[in-house]
Image: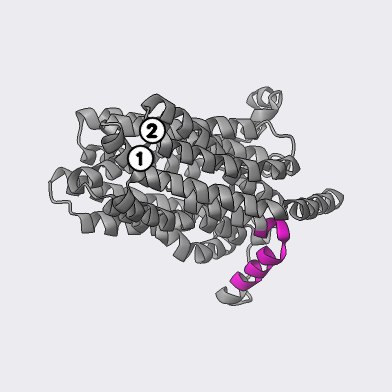
Amino acid sequence: MPRIRVARLPALRAFAHRNFRLFYAGQAISLIGTWIQQIALSWLVYRTTGSGFLLGLATFCSQIPMLIFLPLAGLLSDRYDRRKLMIAAYCLAAIQALTLGVLALTGTIRVWQILLLGFLYGVIMAFETPARQSLISQMVNSRGDLPNAIALNSVLMNSGRLIGPSIAGLLLVFISEGWCFLINAASFTAIIASVTLMRLPPRAPVVARNSLLNDLSVAARYAWHTRPIRLFLALVALISLTASPYTVLMPIFARDVFGGDAHTLGFLVGSAGLGAVIGTAFLTTRPNVFELSKLVPFTSAAAGIALMLVGVSKVYWVSLAFMACQGFGIIVTAASVNMMLQTLVDEDKRGRIISFYAMAFLGMAPIGGLIAGSVAGQLGAPVTAMINGACCLLGALVLMRGLPAARTDLHRALARFTVKS
């Protein structure tokens, strides 16, 4: 019965698959906990140090492992059981959150501990990300429903960004950061249970005949010589380096620009999450991935313009609107590229190509965050936002020049796949 009802709604067609429904339910709970921890951790660092640089450094330490370990993680997700990799990662992430909570509640937490635990969390998530993204294709077991599943997963990820920070802002008024960390630790039980309960189709065992380095170089050459992949990964890297580091600047905006508290911070980040949810909901209605190639240059440019306007604005509610526009631009760009890549890539290369995508989207963010935090310490958050937004806009305009040729190649690739199917 659920399968029949879902089939009548094209925007929700991936929910016809039991495994995807299970994953969605568990991930929904876990993501809220993750965002509660992220906001609480940012607030703890800035409340105790007052340093924009340390705020950027904390983000850098938690995200730079993505850039370092993702190629290896993508290869492992192609070679080994992706579900087991995910479960192991979630168990370790729960231990990391529990450790943070105990240190914070006992009053013994120090900045170096936050940086170290953040780095360990980044390593864990580096191995979880390509395994999770690649496993979606096994959850739906249908290439036709795969773009919708990716779009719905993006809706979920950004709903967590919308709801989690708002809840964190309210929680921090009544409880300490340590309890927020413990809430996140408990939330991992939901995703561990849902992944364990999934009944996945058998996957052909991978026989590793080549070295790790050779397999990585094969995927890297494939990505570089495939023009749509090369262009769209560059676009995602650009937006991650320049626009995504707004999260580092928001605690400074909340306290120093708008004279607010953790509640103000929660609403600023939550507004970007609202825009992202609207963007991903919009993506679920797109009939094919070729249409998405027309959108991404303009949505990336829009993200840059919105960030510039955030830097100019001195009115809180106006800034909330600009943050929503920025969230829309960032996520439509990133999710569209993800949908195009996963539709075109062969199963045996999926984990490695997704790891390259994650390196562009998640791996460049810590570098951008460290730069943004350093510049904000010297010039202030508003000026930093304007500089980053201008760089994002200019970069998007430059990359637009290669769009017509990339779209031609994308159309040919989709046509070949249709014939093969």
In the image, residue 84 lies in the stretch drawn in magenta: no
- Residue type marked 1: Met
Residue 225 within the magenta-colored segment of the rendering: yes
Query: In the image, which disc is placed on residue 365?
Result: none
- Residue 11 rendering spot, x and y as whole percentages: 66, 29
Occupied quadrant, residue 211: bottom right
Quarter of the image with the N terminus is: top right
Residue 82: image location, x then y, percent: 54, 55
Residue 183 picture location, percent across and down: 29, 37
Residue that carries the numbered disc 2 in the rendered image: 268
Badge 2 marks a residue whose secondary structure is helix
**Is the Cβ of the residue at disc 1 closer than 8 Å to that at disc 2?**
yes
Q: Which residues are magenta?
A: 216-230
The residue wearing badge 1 is 250
- Cα distance in 3D space between marks 1 and 2: 7 Å
User: In terms of secondary structure, where does tag 1 sit?
Assistant: helix
Q: Residue at x 67, y 70 (%)?
A: 221
Q: Main secondary structure of the magenta part?
A: helix
At label 1, counting other C-alpha atoms closer than 10 Å, the crowd grade (few under 14, some 14-19, many 20 or more) is: many
Front-lying residue, 390 or 409? 390
